[in-house]
Image (cartoon, helix red, strand yellow):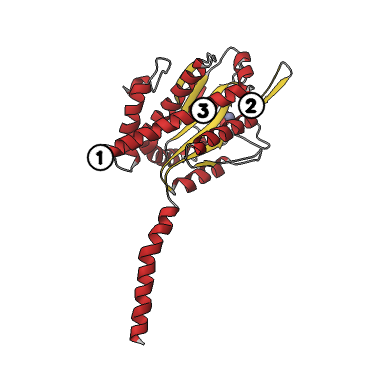
Amino acid sequence: MRTVFLFISGLVCFLTIVFIPKALAASRYPFLVVLDAGHGGTDTGTVQYKKKKIFFEKNFSLIIAKKTAAVLRKKGIPVVLTRTKDSDLSLDSRISIANTWGKKADQALFISIHANSNQEQKVSGLETYVFKAVSNEASERLANIENGHKVVTDGTLDLILTDLVTTANYPDSVRLACSVQNEIAKGLSKKGYKIKNRGVKEALFYVLMKTNMPAILLEAGFATNPTDFSWLNQEKYHDAVSLEISSAVLKWKGGLENHRLSGTGKTGNLSQSHVASAVLKNKHSKGSRGLCSSMY
Ligand SMILES: [Zn+2]
């Protein structure tokens, strides 16, 4: 009887040692990208009508998310989309999806895709946001729109706790934002889209507030500006934006791997700050302002 017990115990130990690590390994991703198509369903985002064409921000964001996912997946990068169709999805659900998948990856990135609007038609261009509890009036106005007028914080304590969560990811979020902003601005310019580079900015975006990874929000043009509007409706523009987001992500990932190969890398987010920094030192363009230019 004792022999049988010892045999079964030994077998259980063997199976645990051999199979569980494999199962765990299979469920982990070295690198993963979460793409969030802004708005959806009854939340249309900005809607603009010009020259018999109608623009829905919710449709644009989904097109870009799907096209970017297709490019990245072809390069072997696992991608999670927060939504794949025209459906309602709360901001909390988007955060929950991101953080659930983020736990399964050594490194995850979160990119929320939007189109901008402004009361003044002349305002145009491309801008990318990172989370910051304190921001200027214009950023607060935009955040209010993108947050769906949701009350973002429950009070001072919530903001302090949020700051603790986002501070660790802040440098990497800024560097990811600068990479995406500069790649798109440069790539679009080469293809004849002389889009204004409005730089990387900070705002109190709810969807970036509690994502436990480098997280950015891209505003890929102003639907209220006639020129941007015509581009936002073009498939070629969609292809170009998606390609440049993918290119920025791949370069960010490339920097991470080079850093690890050099033997100084750690798996934590803070170590990656240096990596992304090295990548961006080469990629930094004159068109980028604000946070990107103040980093070096
Ligand atoms: Zn939006």
Residues marked 1 and 3 touching at CB (< 8 Å):
no
Going from the N terminus, do you reach mark 1 or mark 3 first? 3
Crowding at mark 1 (Cα within 10 Å: few <14, some 14-19, many 20+): few
In which quadrant is the C terminus drawn?
A: top left
Instruction: Give left or right: position of 33 versus 164.
Output: right
Q: Is residue 50 visible from the viewing direction of this image?
A: yes
Q: CA distance from mark 2 to mark 3?
A: 24 Å
Which kind of residue does numbered mark 2 sit on? Thr
The x, y position of residue 195, in whole percent, is 53, 15
Badge 2: how crowded within 10 Å, few (<14), some, or many (20+)?
many
Residue 71: image x %, image y %? 52, 33
Mark 1 lies on residue: 263
Place of residue 38 in the rendered image (x, y in percent of width and height, measured from the top left): 58, 34
Say whether mark 2 is within 8 Å of ligand 1. yes
Q: Which residue is mark 2?
A: 46
Please tell me the numbered disc located at residue 234: none
Based on the displayed image, in which of its 4 quarters is residue 265 positioned?
A: top left
| Residue 46 quadrant | top right
| Camera-nearest residue between 163 and 82 | 82
Name the residue: 49% across, 16% down: 190
> x, y percentage for residue 104?
44, 49
Residue located beneath label 3 in the image = 243
Distance from mark 3 CB to nearest ligand 1 atom below 8 Å = no
Label 3 crowding class (10 Å Cα cut-off): few <14, some 14-19, many 20+?
A: many
- Foreground tag (2 vs 3): 3
Which of the two labelled residues, at mark 1 and mark 2, occupies the earlier sequence position? 2
Label 1 secondary element: loop
